[in-house]
Image (spheres, helix red, strand yellow):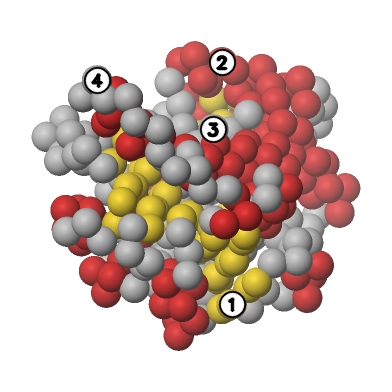
Amino acid sequence: MHPPVALVGNLGTDDEVRYLAALSAAMPEECVRPFRALTEMERATVEVAVVANSDPAEVARLPRLAWIHSLWAGVERLVRDLGAGAPPIVRLVDPELARTMAEAVLAWTYYLQRDMPAYRRQQEAAMWRPRAYRAPADTTVGLLGLGALGAAAAHRLLEAGFRVAAWSRSAPSATARAALPPIVTCAGPDALPDLLARSDIVVCLLPLTAETRGLLDARRLAAMKPGGALVNLARGPIVVTGDLLAALDAGHLSHAVLDVFDAEPLPAGSPLWRHPDVTVLPHVAAPTNPVTAAAVVAGNLRAYRATGRIPASVDTARGY
């Protein structure tokens, strides 16, 4: 009999019920229990914790914890909150999550390519004015980030007929490159301004790290093509909000679609809510699917039980 698997974090009652049901169905051989339902004796035996919005104090009360499986793709909060002495952290790498994110990238790219923000303003003014059509083949989408999410998004955009270019902080490995479609790629800080300058729409899918925090500041936003648009589906602090608002107010950028923010929920007093050239979304681009996520967790845990090897984990120095 294996030690129990702890579900750690503040998911909310309904979400906790869904995740417990999905995890238990995916691995019936395991006993998955919420942290609060475990006795101190049981907590002392836990080797694996499945976490979401975790409390570092709860994690610290699992003295035999060998590794942590995140229920999210983004792990910057876990890395920050748990600190350097944390057990290995395994990110959620779920093909369904990548599919959902690619769907969102395509949807919001269409939204901008078909001038939906302008038509919304015209509706508010009761103005009937067809706008010139811009074909996908005449629209360059610049992707920031070439991990699993970026690769999936690139495939969907190419299938829809868009021109696609992509930037990453470092050159993809040979394995990663094999999964990429035939697109123009570049890497490193020196290559970023050129990518920004030739993209009609820039889509950010980068993880939040020390290097990406504030990456899209006044200087880099100024490097974007005049009239270009930004879609941020990654993490809020990658974009400097004040600099973005200044670029929009100056007319240098035409629109920004923002799904993520420095503080979430976005405070009611934020100027982003009321800016005519900003579309605000409540962090909905790619929600975790409990059933498919549970299947990923179950596969990783079974492999660990069979071999004793911890799945590939986050490089805490890099932050992902």
Question: Badges 4 and 1: C-beta atoms under 8 Å apart?
Answer: no
Q: Which residue is mark 1?
A: 186
CA–CA distance between discs 4 and 2?
Answer: 47 Å
Tag 4 residue: 126
The mark nearer the N terminus, 3 or 1, is 1
Q: Nearer the viewer, residue 108 or 129?
A: 129
Q: Secondary structure at mark 3?
A: loop
Check disc 3 and report the residue beneath it. Answer: 287
In three-dimensional space, the C-alpha distance between marks 3 and 1, rounded to whole angstroms, equals 29 Å
User: Spatial distance from mark 2 to mark 3, Cα to Cα?
Assistant: 16 Å
For discs 4 and 2, the disc positioned in front in the rendered view: 4
User: Which is in the foreground here, disc 2 or disc 3?
Assistant: 3
Mark 3 or mark 4, which has the lower sequence index? Answer: 4
Which numbered dot is residue 17? 2
Q: Is residue 56 left or right of residue 126?
A: right
Point out the residue furthest to the bottom here.
Answer: 190
**How far across and down, in percent of the image, does residue 151 sit?**
68, 57
Q: Amino acid at mark 4?
A: Ala
Three-letter amino acid code at the position of disc 1: Cys
Q: Nearer the viewer, mark 1 or mark 2?
A: 1
Q: Earlier in the sequence, mark 4 or mark 1?
A: 4
Between the C-alphas of marks 3 and 4, the distance is 36 Å
Position of residue 183 in the picture relative to residue 179 (left or right):
left
Q: Label 2 is placed on what type of residue?
A: Val
- Give the x, y percent position of residue 70: 57, 44
Q: Residue at x 80, y 54 (%)?
A: 308
Q: Quadrant of the N terminus?
A: top right
At mark 1, the secondary structure is strand
Q: In this view of the protein, which residue sits in the foreground, 69 or 150?
A: 150
The x and y percentages for residue 303 are 83, 48
Identity, as a three-letter code, of the amino acid under mark 3: Pro
